Amino acid sequence: MSMRSPAPSLGKVEFLVLLWTTFAAFAALYGPQPLLPVIQQHFGVGSQSASLLMTLAILPLGLAPVCYGYILNLCSTRRLLQLTTALCALVLLAASFTTAFWQLLALRTLTGLLVPAILLALMTHISLHSRQESLQRAMAIYTTTTMFGAFLGRIGSGFITSWLGWQAAFLTYALLLGSALPCLLLLQRTRSTQHDVFSPAYLLGVLRQPGLLLLMLIGPLCIFAHASVLNLAPFRMRELLPDAGSWATGLLYVPAFICSLLGIFSKKIMRLLHGEMRTILASVPSLLPSSPLSLLLAIFGMTTGFVLVYTTLPGVVNRMSLAEKNMTNGVYLSVYYTFSALGTWLPVMVYSHFGIVSYVLCLTGVFALALSLVRKNLTINL
């Protein structure tokens, strides 16, 4: 039975605590991306192996909506947040002292297992303690914070590594998460709450709705390619500019951070382009890298399109699905993050074995498929 009705409302200080924890968690999850060439060189591994540091950390996010719902039946969001945040901070601290690549890989996998639990508790706590009229705004601020954490984490880690080494970057992530721990004591005490349990029958029920699976694939296809470019960018930068430091690699993500602000104006852009699907149709082509040599322009264009797809497609999926919203969103997020994890590794494998031309052709094929699915569903807004 839902415990939402008697729950006290979310205070400003409490909300800021949740946002800071969100920022720290996403910085820890995505921050190591520009460090991959440095870590590759330090441990003497290949680019594919180094890319696994991102793949294994993101992949559990695809499984979280299916598996992690059970946890909140056992404990409160407050307790889950305190426990998982403390454990994640310890794992990140241990990562800064690793001496072998397999140790770092194992600790990144543990980070990937803990971060989904942190995010599940954060989102659930916000939804339980927000008034219905303010819930949409609270979740929008939360989503924006996730993007800020992801991109500022990447940018900051590049600078920290240039000055102090990659180990100092992991130590910084640990301190960021650790700083949230005393603040989490300010959260309201809540009892565990019964949630709908995801099962294969529920998942198949959502996916069997006519046309919904193909509609759901548009966003995951875009994040597959976007995650790939963001993961490949540090390696490509080192090839183009061998003497470039980690600070220069971190700067690659500045355009992505600037473009993430477009999400704030997504509703105005939708009105200008007369609907959500038309906005996506206009956004997907801008994801195509214009040139292998113009990484900054490629990331700028891709992130512009990605942010608009990211902020508009979930509304279309929710409106078209006849299943319960939590089930629909859970399935969508599972598919979305699974494609994101695969995007950090599979295209890099194509690049490593066949070169930049084959890599760009591969991404062009992915976007062509996404565009065909958009055109198929264009009449949704008409």
Image: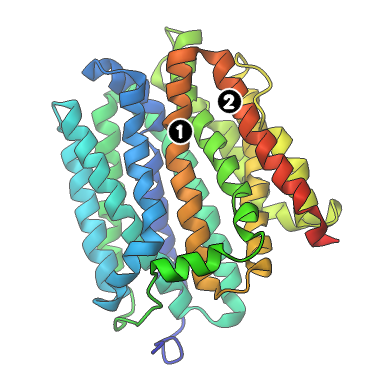
Question: Residue 219 location in percent, x, y?
Answer: 60, 48
Earlier-in-chain disc, 2 versus 1: 1
Residue at 40% x, 16% y is 245
* Residue located beneath label 2 in the image: 362
User: In terms of depth relative to the viewer, which is nearer, 168 or 142?
Assistant: 142
Question: Residue 64 location in percent, x, y?
Answer: 37, 59
Q: Is residue 119 above or below residue 237?
A: below
> Which quadrant of the figure has residue 168?
top left
* Residue type, label 2: Cys
SS under mark 2:
helix
User: In terms of depth relative to the viewer, which is nearer, 302 or 380?
Assistant: 380
Q: Is residue 13 visible?
A: no
Q: Is residue 32 above or below residue 66?
A: above
Residues tagged 2 and 1 counted as in contact (Cβ below 8 A): no
SS under mark 1:
helix
* Residue type, label 1: Ile
Residue at 65% x, 28% y is 364
* Residue located beneath label 1 in the image: 155
> Which quadrant of the figure has residue 212?
bottom right
Question: Residue 38 location in percent, x, y?
Answer: 32, 20
Question: Residue 127 location in percent, x, y?
Answer: 47, 75
